[in-house]
Image (spheres, rainbow, N blue to C red):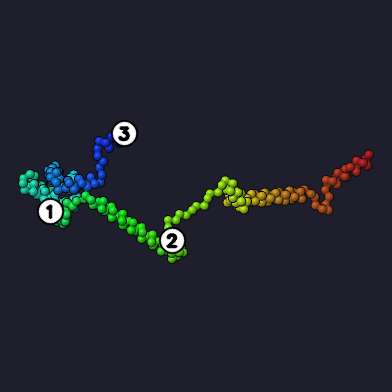
Amino acid sequence: AADLSAAFKAAFKEVTEEDLDAFYDEYRGSAEETADVLRRYEQLKGDMSRVFDWVLCCDEGLDSHRFMGIVDAAIAEGKVSTSKKYKAWRKQASKLPKPVDPLKKRSGQNKASSQALVAVKEERAQKAMAFYDSLEEKYGGSKKRKNKVAQRPPEPTDEEFEAIQNRMFKKAKPASSTFEKQVARMAIAIRQAAGKENSRALSESDEAEEEVKPAKGKKDPSSKKGGAKRNKKAGKA
């Protein structure tokens, strides 16, 4: 790719902005432009809006009256014939104001305008700097800014960084996250629920034992019968 680019540069001249301006000035108003206008006029059957799309270096607002004069002269000489499209366009174009200098040269203007733009930018930058300096003198002390660059503090070494990190971790209090708090609350709730279940189970077992035990002051009838039968057996013996 580099060899191909070098070959093209050697074979063809590099086109600059000055070259384009020179061609613009040379082409406009030339015999070549007149021939191109009439050729496109015939090809496009008098549609001048399309003619402006095909002719080089032209502008419909700037060159309508010039092209109208070219076509009218060719019609008068019999080189081309008129058409309905051209008549309609000519009626509208004749109402446009004529430019003062439609063939004004471009060569040398871009360089001058660029230099003027640079001068304006530099002047604005100087005014801005003067304004900032006045604000600093008024509100920030008497020291002026003269291309001062703020110096960055030196970066700590690995040992210093590790010592700072250790001090930070020692001072920092362990803060439980929201998830840990939720887990702790769930654990407390589970313990409380388990305690309630255990107390309920104990109370139910106590009630069952109370039902099984006989009431105070009453003897078990089965125990009386058993004692009487044992006494009879002992008398017979």
Residue 148 percent location from the top left of the image: 44, 56
Query: What SS does tag 2 mark?
Result: loop
Q: Residue placed at 70% from the left, 49% from the top?
A: 198
Q: Amino acid at mark 3?
A: Asp
Residue bearing the label numbered 1: 91
- Marks 3 and 1 sit apart, C-alpha to C-alpha, by 56 Å
Q: Residue placed at 58% from the left, 51% from the top?
A: 178
Q: Amino acid at mark 1?
A: Lys
Q: Is residue 171 left or right of residue 6?
A: right
Q: Is residue 132 left or right of residue 102?
A: right
**Which is more toward the observer, 69 or 87?**
69
Q: Residue placed at 82% from the left, 48% from the top?
A: 220
Q: How many marks?
A: 3
Residue 230 percent location from the top left of the image: 89, 42
Q: Earlier in the sequence, mark 3 or mark 1?
A: 3
The answer to whether residue 211 of the structure is visible from this angle is: no
Crowdedness near tag 3: few (<14), some (14–19) or many (≥20) residues, C-alpha within 10 Å: few
* Disc ID at residue 3: 3
- Marks 2 and 1 sit apart, C-alpha to C-alpha, by 67 Å
Nearer to us: label 2 or label 1: 2
Crowdedness near tag 2: few (<14), some (14–19) or many (≥20) residues, C-alpha within 10 Å: some
Residue bearing the label numbered 2: 144
